[in-house]
Image (cartoon, rainbow, N blue to C red):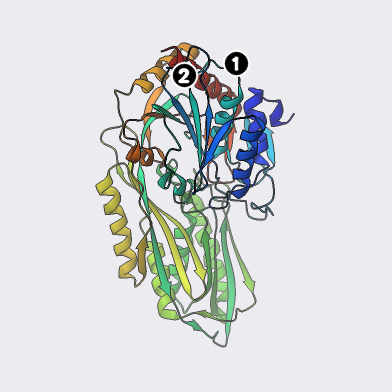
Amino acid sequence: MTIKDLKPTLVWEIFDQLTKVPRPSQHEAKVIEFLVNFAEKHNIKYKKDAAGNIAMFRPAAPGCENAPRIILQGHMDMVCVANDGVNHDFFNDPIETVIDGEWVRANGTTLGADNGIGVAAGLAAMIDDSIVAGPIQALFTVDEEVAMTGANNLGEGMIDGDILLNLDSEEDGEICMGCAGGVGTHAVFAFTPSPVPDGYKFINILFKDFQGGHSGTDIHLERACANKLVMRFVDSIMKKRDVKVANIDFGDKHNAIAVKAEILIGVKADDVDATLAELDDFYAVIRNEYKHTEKDMKVIGTVVDAPASVIDDCTAHRVVAAVYAAPHGVYHMSKEIDGLVETSTNLASVKIKGNEVHVETLQRSSVESRKDEMAQIVEAHFALAGAQVSHSDPYPGWAPNMDSPILNIAADTYQRLFGSRPVTSALHAGLETGLFLINYPNLDMISFGPTLRGVHSPKEKMHIPAVEKFWKLLVAIIETVAKK
């Protein structure tokens, strides 16, 4: 059995097609071409703006011309992360899907269900003639996962609706009515390459196979940050002996909790055995600390050839201390919505680029002032360590509206279909909805989707029964709105 054999057939067939189209964030040319070809094949009117966003338009069924206009919205890009040792070219290779019991996952990579399943459902709704609908628009945006470039630069006249259904949530039985805003903070340490001193041997230290996850929806689960753990170890041995740092390669995407961190250090030849023994001891310590959340993590130390140069000692000590001590995790919980993270920061990646060490972080909050404060805290931390600090363009949150008509319709529809009332919630993750409200302040919006787990990591998987419920709910909401 393949995913094309699953129900609902149309949705899974389109999702299968999407898994074969490379679509890394900020490299969406191939999926844009796929969407344009889809619209032309099915004689769907469409628009493309300068940012690369695609909008499609389905006319109303007879008798439904005056129904409220619905916009189905998702993003076409995906987070691209592979397990260590998996040789996958995200710019050219298709995602290899696997049916694993009641779940669909990928073979060693992210699946792209975030937000491929939302795009697939939106496209299915555009061509399923059995749906009795009013006017439907589908909007597929670019670069949601990195900078929300598409939503930030939506072309004039791309959408013209009354209701927006964002199809980018990840929990069956929940309807989202709000989300956090975010801003990235980027620190750069310039260093001077120094020659490798005589009598030093080098150890490549690799921390891998951490759970990682989404820096919004998983940040409260207290999973280990591989980046901080590596620097915790290096900081500890720097207090005992002279240590050179030659290379740093931590984490990956700014919105993903790091699953892997690798550093190349040099110690005097007589200290190699002691350093490796201390690494083993440290591994035992963190295995105990994270025995409930990081059952698969591995720590490996390997003696390797000396590099051509090392980071100058002053900068190396500042980088190690700054990354080790950097803020990471939950800072405030919401006092308005029980269990919701209000404010957090993610220490996402640390990379050497030329003669600079680049540190990427992401701050989120559902309170704008606290989002700004969290970014200022991170900026102050790295500035004190001597880094040059800058911020990405912030994106706003989406304030909950408990009086939303479409929220009530969706909740009533869910109860009618499935016999229970859905949870209404807000997400700590960022959605594009807040940006749409800037130019379309009267949009009535909700977000929902099927159950996903492990998004932004190679553990990403999608619950098969939840996809069928998601599709039934989407169709029923569309038809209920048409009747009104």
- Could you classify mark 2 by the number of other residues whose Cα lies within 10 Å: few (under 14), some (14-19), or many (20 or more)? many
Nearer to us of marks 2 and 1 is 1
Residue type at mark 1 is Ser
| For residue 334, side relative to residue 185 (left or right) | left
In the displayed structure, does residue 7 sit left or right of residue 289? right
Residue 336 x/y as whole percent: 26, 33
Q: Position of residue 353 (x, y in %)?
A: 51, 70
Tag of residue 54:
none
Mark 2 or mark 1, earlier in chain: 1
Label 2: which residue?
A: 477
Q: Circle 1 sits on which residue?
A: 130
Residue in view at x 27 percent, y 43 percent: 367
Q: Nearer the viewer, residue 27 or 126?
A: 126
Q: CA distance from mark 2 to mark 1?
A: 14 Å
User: Is the residue 47 above or below the residue 307 in the image?
Assistant: above
> Which image quadrant is residue 468 in?
top right
* Residue 175 image offset from top left, x and y in percent: 41, 26
Q: Is residue 220 among what the camera can see?
A: yes
Q: Is residue 64 above or below residue 210?
A: above
Above or below — where is 134 with respect to 143?
above
